[in-house]
């Protein structure tokens, strides 16, 4: 009899303990409902990509010298540089240039190594298409002006976390004129120059 009562007592204690933990957990869960959801309401709101964001590649036909460096540094030798040798001028003549964005991994190697800077990364990332062949951009498509989140009147641009003012965690309602947290590159350079000058004085 005593053993049975002991078991009932233990069971009740465990049940009360479990109910206690569940109540604590639920109170934390319900507390989250009181907070404003930090959700980007795409496509009406969009985050502004960072300065070094690697979006769709932009290409300038007039600057390209058909050197094919972009092909050699590409992990999959992707850019197609279509040129012929002009025997009269003894120079390469560029006919066409294309990059297939269905295959590109947006590593940016081609942009880094292009000697004439005719390739650049844009902030355009909405490239979805119904037909994979339409992702193969020729030099005309690559030369198009990229779309921009900040210039689209139908979109509310939101700053990414690293671009928010000090102490802000939510991009909603942040005054766009407020400076981002951290120092500007010129401030860091000035500090480094001042520190170097001090060291030189001491020596
Ligand atoms: S971004 Fe990378 S994968 Fe795409 S074409 Fe350039 S080098 Fe090749
Ligand atoms: S590296 Fe630049 S200049 Fe050379 S072929 Fe590629 S895009 Fe043209």
Image (cartoon, rainbow, N blue to C red):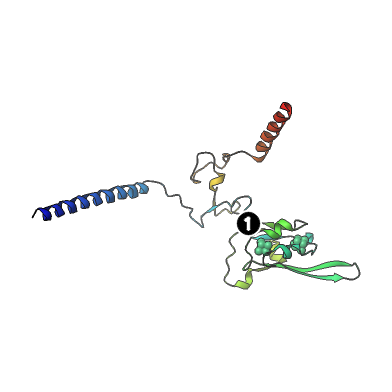
Disc 1 within 8 angstroms of ligand 1 (CB): yes
Q: How many marks?
A: 1
Residue reaching furthest to the right? 88
Q: Quadrant of ligand 1?
A: bottom right
Residue 23 shown left or right of residue 53 in the figure: left
The answer to whether 85 appears left or right of 202 in the picture is: right
The residue lying toward the viewer, choosing from 128 and 51, is 51
In the visual, does 194 lie left or right of 17? Answer: right
Q: Residues within 10 Å of mark 1 (few under 14, many from 20)?
A: some
Farthest left residue?
1
Question: Residue 68 appears at what percent x and percent y?
Answer: 76, 65
Frontmost residue, 186 versus 180: 186
The N terminus: image quadrant = bottom left
How far across and how far down the image is residue 45, in percent?
51, 53
Seen at 67% across and 65% down, the residue is 75
Residue at left offset 70%, top offset 30%: 199
Residue 30 drawn at (x, y percent): 33, 49
User: Would residue 62 appear left or right of 18 to someone viewing this image?
Assistant: right
Q: Quadrant of the C terminus?
A: top right
Residue 90: quarter of image:
bottom right
- At mark 1, the secondary structure is loop
The residue at which mark 1 appears reads as 54
Of residues 129 and 180, the one drawn nearer to the viewer in this rendering: 180
Q: Compared to 187, does 162 lie above or below?
A: below
Q: Position of residue 184 (x, y in %)?
A: 64, 39
């Amino acid at each position: 009899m005593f053993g049975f009562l002991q078991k009932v007592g233990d069971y009740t204690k465990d049940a009360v303990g479990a109910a206690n933990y569940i109540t604590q957990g639920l109170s934390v869960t319900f507390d989250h409902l009181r907070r404003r959801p930090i959700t980007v309401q795409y496509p009406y709101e969009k985050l502004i990509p960072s300065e070094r964001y690697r979006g769709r590649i932009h290409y300038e036909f007039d600057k390209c010298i058909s050197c094919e460096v972009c092909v050699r540094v590409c992990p999959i030798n992707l850019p197609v540089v279509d040129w012929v040798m002009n025997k009269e001028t003894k120079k390469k003549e560029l006919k066409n240039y294309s990059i297939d964005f269905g295959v590109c991994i947006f590593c940016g190697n081609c942009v880094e190594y292009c000697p004439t800077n005719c390739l650049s990364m844009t902030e355009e990332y909405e490239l979805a298409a119904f037909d994979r062949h339409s992702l193969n951009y020729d030099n005309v498509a690559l030369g198009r002006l990229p779309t921009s989140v900040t210039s689209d009147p139908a979109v509310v641009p939101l700053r990414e976390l690293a671009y928010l003012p000090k102490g802000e965690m939510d991009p909603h309602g942040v005054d766009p004129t407020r400076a981002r947290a951290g120092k500007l590159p010129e401030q860091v350079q000035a500090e480094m120059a001042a520190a170097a000058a001090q060291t030189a004085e001491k020596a």
